[in-house]
Amino acid sequence: MGIVAGLDSSSESTRIVVCDADTGAVIRQGYAPHPVEKGSEVDPQAWLMSLGEAAGNGLLEGVQAIGVAAQQHGLVPLDADGNPVRPALVGNDKRAQSAAADLVDALGGRAAWAHAVGAVPQAQHPVTKLRWLARSEAAHAARIAEVMTPHDWLAWQLLGRPARRTTDRGGASATGYWSAATGAYRPDLVELALGHQVRLPEVLGPSGTAGFTPEGLLISAGTGETMAAAFGLGVGVGDAVVSLGASGSVFAIHEEALADPTGTITSFADATGRHLPVVHTTNAVRVLRGTAEMLGTDLAGLSELALASSPGAYGMVMLPYLEGERTPHLPHTAGSLHGMRRESMRPEHLARAAVEGMLCGLADALDVLRGRGVAVRRVFLLGAAAELGAVQAAAPGLFGAQVVVPQPAEYAALGAARQAAWAWQVAHGTAAGGDDGAGYPEPPRWPAAASQVFEPGEELPVWQAVRQQYAAVRDEAHPGAFQREG
């Protein structure tokens, strides 16, 4: 074959990578910011403008197929003519929190939602945004005839707005009205939220084709950012990914959907035909930044201080629930520091306690997945904080697994490009023989991400003792909170 492109339309920018379809080698890249928008709404035309700018100067010359990844919790409400009823609602919109609680009650509780679609409504879910629109903007809600997510809408625009509307399993699983377990929509949940039925996109398989542009470019199924990043990283069964943002997320590749009646696990579909169970934590790097500010330093300085301490932080334990917590479910609690003695009250021990507390909180999230039978043999650690020496030193032992820290790259865009190459091969009958284990032809075998690898090593028993110390403090401070998550 030849050349493919992947684009990632995130909440802040459009990033495009153009790759050799056979080797995955990046040939050229493009970038453009999205216009600054106030609040949690955006004119979807801004995504197209950004895409056009990122693809300028002949970036897509010679490209034969394009994959689209985008923020997976956005909602584009359209009228009967396919035009936006109002600006798109993006994933960080918090206004729908009360609507989420209302939907949970309307269906009969968290377990009912987990059974229906593998997820309990949160403010970010499109189904919840529909409920908010029905309550807060009744006139707009009444005009909604169909709904799309951002990657659906962008692919549709690239194709010239054809009669066929498509999405993929990954994007659909993040809506709150499609079940990864059954592979089917729940239109009754759309009606429960909005008050009437709407047109929903056809759900394609991961190697499917949304269509061809008038110029003959293939547009693949596309997917959400998280699913595309996992595909770009090359993670598979036995791998977990821990993402270190202000908050944290832990997900893994699994062969089946997981219905969790507590709502702690969200059951997404991935971009390969498998499943992607996710557990979120409210607190991750915000713990490190807050501690660094307290100590008058930055993240690099905090890491240096922590490395001057020793595992266990001289008996000091930080419960990192600074903004409440989702895992365990403690929305109204606060963080706390335990085990302070005169000899432990030093900057380096506090720094170490912050690093260990953050990682132990994420290890708790990993244990939720392990407790449901998800294999975790290695952990990919993402985010700027993954580069910190103190994090790299502690993570393998606290996670109880090999830790892989990939070099920074545009993994969501790379995943979209890899999907484009896969769809092109399938459409032209050149895909590898057999299937990938999930019932689809094998995807292109692109090289694994360049990474640093860290092993638990001989100090594993020491780190296990640190986890036990943390767990004892956690369970004493919040009896039974974590056990309810398993």
Image: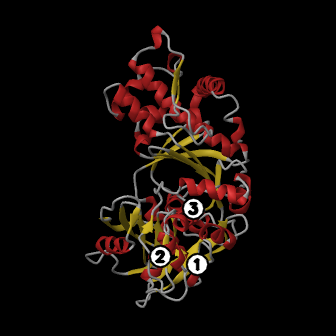
Instruction: Report whether 196 appears left or right of 144.
Output: right
Residue 21, given in percent of the width and then of the height, sits at 46, 73
Kind of element beneath mark 3: helix
Which residue sits furthest left?
57
Kind of element beneath mark 1: loop
Q: Mark 1 near mark 2, Cβ–Cβ under 8 Å?
A: no
| Amino acid type assigned to the residue bearing label 1 in the image | Pro
What residue is pinned by disc 1?
201
Residue 185, given in percent of the width and then of the height, sits at 67, 72
Q: Residue 128: give its label.
A: 3
- Going from N to C along the chain, the mark reached first, 3 or 2, is 3
Compared to residue 105, the image places residue 307 above or below, namely above
Classed neighbour count for the residue bearing mark 1: other residues with Cα under 10 Å, few (<14), some (14–19), many (≥20): some
What residue is pinned by disc 2?
153
Classed neighbour count for the residue bearing mark 2: other residues with Cα under 10 Å, few (<14), some (14–19), many (≥20): many
| Amino acid type assigned to the residue bearing label 3 in the image | Thr
Residue 242, given in percent of the width and then of the height, sits at 53, 46
Splitting the image into 4 quarters, where does residue 377 fall? top right
Kind of element beneath mark 2: helix
Which residue lies at the image location 36% right of the left edge and 26% below the top edge?
Answer: 294
* Closest to the observer, 234 or 472: 472
Classed neighbour count for the residue bearing mark 3: other residues with Cα under 10 Å, few (<14), some (14–19), many (≥20): many
Q: Residue 122: give its label.
A: none
Give the spatial CA distance, label 3 vs label 2: 19 Å
Give the spatial CA distance, label 1 vs label 2: 10 Å
- Going from N to C along the chain, the mark reached first, 1 or 2, is 2
| Amino acid type assigned to the residue bearing label 2 in the image | Trp
